[in-house]
Image: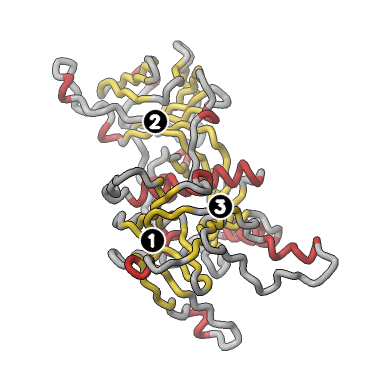
Amino acid sequence: MAGVERPAKTPGVGVFLELREKLQSGLLIVGKDVARSPADVAVTGGDSSLHIRTPRGEQSLTLPAGVTLEQGSCIPTPAEGARGEELHYRMRINVARSSDEDAYDSVMETLRAKETYCFSCQGCMTRLLEDRVFKRVLPLPNGNWNAIVDDWCCHPDPFANKKLLPRAEDCLLGDTFLLLPRDDSCDQTLTEEVSPVGAEDSQDPKKPCRRHTLISCKSCSSVLGEAVAPGTLKLYITQVVVEAAVGDRKPEASLNRSVFLEGTIAARLLELSNSLSTFHFSVQTPDGKAFLLLWLLNSDSIIASVPEMCVGGERSASSPALHSPSPRAARALKLLYVVCSDTGILQRDIVNSWEVNAIGHPVVLPLKVCEELLRVIDDSNSALPASMRCMRSYEVAYLRL
């Protein structure tokens, strides 16, 4: 965990936009290398678009349908903490419809009984399981359900040391994984391998060695999950693509890994936050070690970012065919985060406080996926204007839906 490389912070961005649908307001930040004073910037709105004129030329941003600028509302404001390196503007927006109307369902919300689904490896899009039909699709209890059974039962825990496993034609849904019954077809697409003993476990003779039977894609060797019991597959939602089986449709080309991981985790955090009424999440490895602490700050953000070198571009009004597509603003979750391996004193205090007070709903992911998620979040933080990267002792990032 301590060996995860984190990107160096970049000086800033050319143009950054964050809109808040529920507040119907927005923040625009323009870098010092794009414009020197508020007089250098003019902002106008179009049909679901925003136009920003700077000395480098006009930059257009495409907004979600129904979101428009309230004309004349964009005004410069003091840039707190930016020390003159950025120009800040506040604006008002009009939202024709709520983002609640948009669906960001993860696989957990889309699986239905008596429907036919195909499971593919996210890495290479090889079909793993063909035409699976489930008689029952049932949610598992929350991740820490077993820890509180004694508080509710007046007799010994009847579930002690017992696993909740699917029966034939069942699909059980965890927070970040699916439990499926294994069949003969799995031998053609999946491989099993016992995980190596961790360095910490091997050095501690009193600590039981936790070894898992890992399930991997036979085509690309990507780890997909675990065999939690004979005949039962545990597949993480970050490792597989689940699609409704429609005719003879062939699997699509491999999806961009970072984009898939970001969208999958963002949609799942939003669902968990809404269903559990919580905003704190502890991203953990399967052995229960906390890796990353996430605090969901906003779920109604719309963001767009244009690197300094791309602002204005090389556009020509006389050559519309040469125009590149306008950057598209995307709905996103705004997060505060702390890396549990951070050695900073303030960060360690936050981690200890979360642990002592049991703050944070556990979100369990394989170690490699935790590291990938951290890189995605760090990349988001690095791309933010300097004044927005930190909030007190937390770092700030966005996960696009």
Q: What crowding class fits label 3: few (fewer than 14 Cα within 10 Å), some (14-19), or many (20 or more)?
A: some
Element at label 1: loop
Do the residues bearing badges 3 and 2 touch, measured as CB atoms within 8 Å? Answer: no
Marks 1 and 3, how far apart in space?
39 Å
397 lies above or below 3: above
Which residue extends farthest top?
72
Q: Which residue is mark 3?
A: 137
Sequence-earlier tag: 3 or 2: 3
Q: Which mark is residue 329?
A: 2
Amino acid tagged 2: Ala
Which residue is at the front of the view, 324 or 342?
A: 324
Residue 228 as seen in the image, left or right of residue 62: right
Sequence-earlier tag: 1 or 3: 1
Quadrant in which the C terminus appears: top left
| Residue 312, image x, y percentages | 26, 26
- Mark toward the viewer: 1 or 3: 3
- Quick check: can you spot residue 274? yes
3 lies above or below 309: below
Q: Which mark is residue 5?
A: 1
Element at label 3: strand
Amino acid tagged 3: Val
- Mark toward the viewer: 2 or 1: 2
Which residue extends farthest bottom?
205
The quarter of the displayed image where residue 71 is located: top left
Q: How many marks?
A: 3
393 lies above or below 181: above
Amino acid tagged 1: Glu
- Quick check: can you spot residue 342? no
Which residue is at the front of the view, 389 or 236?
A: 236
